[in-house]
Every structure is written in structure tokens, then in C-alpha cells.
Image (spheres, rainbow, N blue to C red):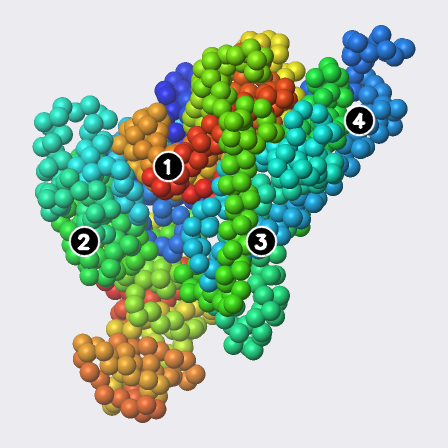
Amino acid sequence: MSRIEISKVNKYYGEVHVLKDLDLVVEDGDFMTLLGPSGCGKTTTLRVIAGLEAPRSGTLRIGGQLAADGEVSFNLPPAKRGVNLVFQSYALWPHMTVFDNVAFGLQIKKAPKPLIKEKVTGALGRLHIAEFAERYPSELSGGQQQRVAIARSIVSEPRVLLLDEPLSNLDAKLRIEMRSELKRLHQELKTTVVYVTHDQVEALTMSTKIAVFFEGRLVQADTPKGIYGNPVDIRVADFIGNPKINFIGCECSRDGDTMVVDSVLGRMALGNVASRNARFGSIGVEPASCGAASILAVRPEHVHVGREPSPGAVRCRIYSALPAGSETLIQAAVNGDTIMAKVIGQAEFGQDEEAWLSLQQDKLNVYDKASGRIALGALA
Amino acid sequence: MSETKSAAAPSPAGLGRGRGLTKARNVLVSLFTNPYNVISLVSIVVLVYLIVVPLGEIVGTTFRWQPKDSRLVEGAVPGAFTTYHWKAMFSGDTARAMLWEPLANSLSVALCVSALSLLLGGLIAWLVTRTDLPCRGFFSFLVLVPYMLPSWYKALAWITVFKNERVGGNPGFLAAIFGWSPPDWLAYGFVPTVLTLSIHYYAFAYLLISSALSSIGGDLEEMGEIAGASRLTILRRITFPLVLPAVLSAFILTFSRAIGTFGVPAFLGLKVNYYTISTMLYASVRNRQTVQAYILSLVLILIAVFTVYLNQAMIGKRKSYTTIGGKGTRKNLVSLGKWRRPILAALVAFMVVAIIFPVAVLLLESFLERDGIYRLDNLTLHYWAGASKPSIAEGESGIFRNAAIWRALGTTMKLVLAASVIATFVGLVLGYVISRGRKKASGRLIDQVSFLPYLIPSIAFGAIYLSMFSRPRLFIPALYGSLGILVLISVVKYLPFSVRAGTSNMMQIGTELEEAAMVEGASFGRRFRKIVMPLAGKGFLSGFILIFISAMKELDLIVLLMTPATQTLAAATYSYAEGGYHQFSDAVITVIVAIIMIVYVLAAKIGKVDMSKGLGG
């Protein structure tokens, strides 16, 4: 059992309030990614779980066992938590061979030598670096060092594996390779993984759950699909997705189970509000009521640009078209606003050409401008 | 790693007890079982006890009547507060002889030494880093040699060459060979003191200025060239302003070191009653004028504090350009043209005068049966290996047969090894605490307190420890006359260097390496032994060598604390010279120089130790 429960945790560095009333549950066997811009508190959360930082208030339980309680300054030492950590810098000890690096923890625990050898060899084999056992870290490439760091962290079979931006020092090709390696490893070992990154693609491709942080607060903890399709906060919507989501200022009003949205794209009546917002209850989010100052958010792949007028489409002018092989990015100007569309395949548009633009209405999200909170979700 | 180390036995929740109580208990347990806190606390207590308390005590002593005052001054109540001593020192009958004249001498010596050192060091630094002078690598090694050797050995050599009949005894080299007796001003006092100290301290200026010069990107000067500036304009408008902070620093730091130096003015001044503050301080201690000695110590300390403060104030971070420009940029070396050979010759001549000549003169003299008589039939090995002869030097036998010298060699090696090992290790531990606690008050406090000994000139430090540890103190027995006090004072005095070396060493070891071991369950002791120490090994060696060399040549620091039983080689040199046994002191100093040179060369060649960081001594 390795469920992690973080409850009302606050953490300060000096005067700086880095974690604000953090509540987060990581279920047993989850691959939970903590995602957010730098300085948002994701690494601090990881270090609190590891036991390298103590919370000022709030509690942390790992597998039902109390690991930290800020109120009574209780903090279980890292080694007694059954966790292990892979550092961003790998933190391999440069004066020890690969074998000794991986064996260190088992030696501390005074495991018998044959067992150490067996386990270390097993871990190195699992990460395909068995042949480097007698080398020193400086004699390995970055990707190989990364594998040693991971081997070191799994050799003691931790209940929870913590990874702090482990791939950020690798080149793009290696990164993709290690992503699938890590995903396979998670499924083979069946441990709970907490993974810190600022790279949304990493988060979306590897995780079973993603927790998005802004300024020390957990804003949304959800499945990757939920984070992408139904960001509950406008900052999450803005942070996730490449190319970026389109924001269009709008006015909206509620009419029974229908929401009426007025914007430069004209008037849209979006039905089934109750069912569109149904899932927010399950992740503990209360949708905002909408009003005169609202924002319509639409991902570029849900914008359609065509040469012929169609019902609901508005006239636009092509500002630029950027074909990139499998897809084309189109910037279209509508009544003073610029909207980005992603079209599959090569779309041939000339500059300043006239076209017709429409939105896929069931994929729209609407936010309250003042609070940034979701008012209307997209249909899954 | 900041707040959480292994708490020994924290309890999650207080069953049947108040949560507040549980919290207090957990906080205390983690505070006192956290090795970082324990080491910080112990360090602060020990540093305060060894540095701040002695300072406070001597300040206090100078403001109190002493037991012997009651016999001399009417109305003096031993132990009561008084400003008598300060008044007497600054305006009494003896003020002129005891304070003002020595102060004027110290200040003028320090000023002239700083100016001359700057000129010499700056010029050589520019030649070595910025011109096409041949053999620059060799020179950059050689120019530091005078600094590695004791400053007072040059004073000994000076006396040997320039001695005239004023102080009696046999004539000097010049008088004996050329029949020319140098005038007093050239033989003793101000002029030779300034010259010999400058030949020592120029290396200090050289180090600071050459590192500033080599860190200026060549592109900055090339840009000036593109703008059409002449070479002189570039030097004046670009290069000089950029190295100005280093130049100022070099001046002020040389001043702060030269002001308190003892060995050189002692050899060159005491015999003709030319006193500086430091030699007057020495004489006061010898005459048991303790309070006067303390006041002189405080005067020295105040001057040193003031100069270092001046350095900080004038050269703030804003004006420090030394990191500007990449080191990798190719530098256009200034062509010396037709001056190349003359300058090379001048530099070689300078090296000969500064390094080879003093050693050669002293070595030669050590082979003369009677000093001052430069004839073949006067040559002897007696002072090196001769058996005791009543006709020579009152029966003192040659140094290789002399039990006292062998003992001094043993003492020196014990002292130097103990001091450098302990100082380097303490430097590492304190460096660890400082580097891991940079954002904490405790880390900064330790950093600052460990720098204090830098502000206390060696001779003043000796005077303070003489009175502090001549009687038993809290947990410490009376140390006077033991090797212990010499080791203690050396370790404390070299702390500023060992702690700085230790800190920069520890900064290079990322905290993550330690945290990774913590996650694996390694205790603090194990982490320090298995992770930190092995990684600090190389820095340990270079720190060790630097302190080894500094301690080997040390005279100022220990001259007051020495007893015949704990004489070191340096002190033996001093007492032989004081007694007029020049050949013996020549022989002993040759041994010291040989040991230092061997260690220096070995360290540079084998250990790849960067001596340019050795700003000690």
C-alpha cells in the first residue's frame, strides 16, 4: 500500500510562502505528475514527500502511516518512508563506480553481499546498463548516467518512486526514449510514481494523473485528458497545449440549461450546461457563474477554417498560413481578434485571403474573467 | 536539507499529552540530533571562546588597574576601572618613545612597502600576463618564490651584506670585500626594512593584479583599438580602470599585513633602537609591561580593521569587474619590441637579487669560521656538522650534531603537521557548515567570526594568547611552554585561509549528492565520511600544503610563546641571530628554505596545487 495523502500542507522558505494549503491524494499505483511553471511549488511538494523538507503545518501520510505533521514538528527521516528519489542532476557520487552507486543504499541496510550483487545486477539489467557496472559516472553519457540514477532509486524496491525533472538534461531524442522506458518501468514495478516536470508533453504522455500548480497552489488534479480538455482554471488552459489555446473575450448569460455566448464570432447558444459541467463535481470543483466579462477558450484543433460559408461560420481574413507537413497552422483575423487554427494536412491559403471560420461548439470552455474559474466545460 | 535531518526518535502524536508538549519535544529532539545544528553550535562556542573572548579580555585589562600599579600609582585599586593606562600611553612621559615614534615608523614603513610592492608587483603582473616576454610561465612560478620563504630571511641576508661597525662584531660583506662601510641609514632601520619587505610583499600585489588582468577579456581592449585608441590610451582608459579595484585592494591588504610584521624590523631595527609598533610590543612583553603591550596590540588591530573596512567600503561589489569578459578570449599580447631583451635581463636580475642572492649570501656565510672574513682558509663545515669546539661559538656544535636543533626540527615538523592537518580539517568542517548554511544566521556568523583572526596581526595575537593560556582556563590546562599552545594559535590564526579554502571546496560538492545518500538512509557521519570527505580530498591537499608552508616560516606568531623546550627552527634562527651566532642562524634558515622549496615544488608539480590562492603569512 503506498497511497500518499497530503492534507492542508503549508511550507515557507523564510518569509516566502511556497506551498499554500496543499491537499493532494496520490492513489496506490498512480503515475502522478506535478506540473507547473518554475517556482510554483512542485519540486517543494516532491521534497516534502521525500522528507527532505518539513512542512510548517499540515500532514503527510504514506501508505496510511503518518510521515510528517507540521503542527507537532514531526518529520519521519527520508530513509524510513520507503521512498526513493531521482534528482534532476542525477546526483551520482562521482567517486564511486556505477555498481557502488547503486549498491550504496543496500550496503547501508547491511544486506548480505550476494543479495546486493543480485539486486544491483538486476536493476542495472533492467535499465540495460549492466555492462557499465565498473565504470565511474564521468565515463558515461548523460543518458547512461540517467539510467544509473534510476537504477539506484529502484534497487531498494521503494513503495514510492519520486522523480524530479529527470529528463530535463537530456537531448530531445533521448528524452523520448526515456519517456517510454519510464512508462514501462512504472507498469512493471507497479510502484506509485510522483514525477515533477515543467514539460507538458512529458506530463500528458506518461501520467495517469496530473496535478497542476500555480504560485504554490494546487489548481487542478485530474487525468491528462481532463487537464487538456477541461482545464478548470484559465491559467491551466493557457499553460497546457501547443500551439496555445485561443482566448476570446465574450459576454454570456444563462438561459435554463443553455448558455448564450456573445463574442466577435457572433452569438452561440451552448446547450446541456448540466451535463457539460457534470464532471467537475467529481474532482471537487464548483463552476463559476458567468456574466458580462467572460472568456471563451478554444483549442486550435477545434477551429475550422473553410473557403465556403457554412451555418454559424463568420467571415475572416487569413493573416498567415504556416504549413508544417502533417498539419497547417492558420492565423485568422476576425473583427480585430486573431484566432489560431490547426488544420490536419496541407491547407493552401494565400495571405489576406478571405475565409470562413467556425468553432466545434461541444469542445468550448468558458471562464469567468475575474476569477479565472471555469464556467462551462467542454463535452468529453 | 535545510530543516529536516534525521530526528532521533520523534513521536508522531502525543498520546495522552498535549500537542504543544509533543511539538516542543520534537523540535528540541530535531534541533539537537541534527548534526548541522550541533556542529554550528559547537563551532560558534569554540570560535567565540578562542577569538572573541581573548579580545574582550585584553580590552578589559587595559581599562583596569593591575596589581603592580598599586605600587607605582597612588590611589590605584587593582581591578577597578581606569583610563590611566590609555592616557599614559597616549600622552604620558613615555608616549613619544613607546607609541608615537613606533607608530610613525610602522605607518611610514607600511605605506612605502605598499607603494613599492604595488609598483613591482603590478609591473611584473603586466609583463607576465600581457606582453610577449619570453618564459612567462616560468616567471609566473618564480615570482611567488620570495613569498613562500620567510620575509625575515631577506633581512638576515641584508644585514650580512650591509653590516657596518655600528653594532660591533665582524664586518659585513661589503665592508670586508670592498672596504666600504655602508652608512647607517642603508644598513639599519627604515630603508632596509622597506626594501626587504617590498621584495616579500610584491608577490601579494602580483597575485591580485595578475588575476585581475588575466580575467579581462581581450575583446575589451580590442574594441578600444577598433575605436582608434592608441596603446597608451587603451592602457589608461580601459585596462587601468578595470584593474583599479584589484590595485586598491592590493595596496590596502599589503598595508594591513606590513603594518604588523615583526621579524624584519626586529632583525633590522632593534639593534639601533629603531622601533615599530610590533617590535615595541615585543619589547613590552619581554619587559613585562603587559598592559602597554595590550594597548599596542589593540592599536595594531584597530589599524588592520580600519584598512580592511576601507577596502570593503571603497571597493564595493559594484566596482568589482574581475569577472567581466571571458577567460577564453584570445589576448593580443603587447609586443615589447626592442625592449624585450633589456626587460628580460632586468627581470632576471631582480629574481637573482630577490631569491638567489639572499640564499647564496647566507649559505656562504654559514661556511665561514669567522663571519665577515671572506678567505678560503676561513672556510669550515663546523657550523653544519662540526663537533663542539670551545674556541668557536662557546662550544655550540654544528647544527647536524646539535641535539637542540634536531629537537627544534622535530618540534617544527610536529607543529607544522599538526597545525596544517587540524586547520585544514577544521576549515573543511566550518566550510561545510558555512556553505550549507549560507542563508542562515549561523552560517554567516561562523563565516564572519572565523575571519576575525585575519584582522589581528600575528605578534598581537601571540601577546593575547600568551596571557590567555599561561594559566588554566575552562577545560584547558595551562598551555604555556607546551607544543599545544603553538598548535592552537597556529590553527586559529590560519582559520581565515583554511575556512575560505574549505568553503569553496564544499561549495563544489552539491547538496544533492548528500541528499541522495540521506534518502538511502546514510547517517550524517557516514555521509561525511563516504561522500563529502572523498570528494573534498583534492582541495584538502592544496589547503594543507598552503598552511604547511605558512606555518613552516612562521616567526611573528610564535616568537612570544616560545620556550627553549618548544623552540622551532624559525625561532632557533631568531635566537641565534639575536645572540650574534650568524653562521648558525644562516645554516638553520637554509634548512627551512630547503624544506619549503621542496614542498613548494612537489606541491606544484605533483599535487597541481594552485599556490596563487596562498595569501597567508
Q: Distance between the residues labelled 4 and 1?
A: 45 Å
Q: How crowded is mark 1: few (under 14 residues within 10 Å), some or many (20 or more)?
A: some
The 10 Å Cα crowd at callout 3, few under 14, some 14 to 19, many 20 or more, is: many
Q: How many labels does the image show?
A: 4
Residue lying at the far right in this picture: please name it.
B74
> Which numbered dot is residue B122?
3
Disc 2 marks a residue whose amino acid type is Met
Quadrant (top left/top right/bottom left/bottom right) for the N terminus of chain A: top left
Residue assigned mark 4 = B98
**Image quarter for residue A96?**
top left
Mark 1 vs mark 3, CA separation in Å: 27 Å
Residue A115 relative to residue B37: left or right: left
Q: Do the residues labelled 4 and 1 touch (CB within 8 Å)?
A: no
Residue located beneath label 2 in the image = A178
Which label sits on residue B1?
A: none
Q: Nearer the viewer, residue B241 or A85?
A: B241
| Earlier sequence position, callout 1 versus callout 3 | 3
Residue B538 vs B123, above or below: the answer is: above
Discs 4 and 1 share one subunit: yes
Residue type at mark 1?
Answer: Leu
Mark 2 is surrounded, within 10 Å at the Cα level, by few (under 14), some (14 to 19) or many (20 or more) other residues, namely some
Nearest-to-viewer mark from 3 and 2 = 3
Q: What separation in Å lies between label 3 and label 4 (alpha carbons)? A: 35 Å
Query: How far is mark 2 from mark 4, CA to CA?
Result: 78 Å
Query: Which of the labelled discs sits on residue B602, or is there none?
Result: 1
- Give the alpha-carbon distance from disc 1 to disc 2, as whole Å: 47 Å
Q: Mark 3 lies on which chain?
A: B
Q: What residue type is labelled 4?
A: Met
* Foreground tag (2 vs 4): 4
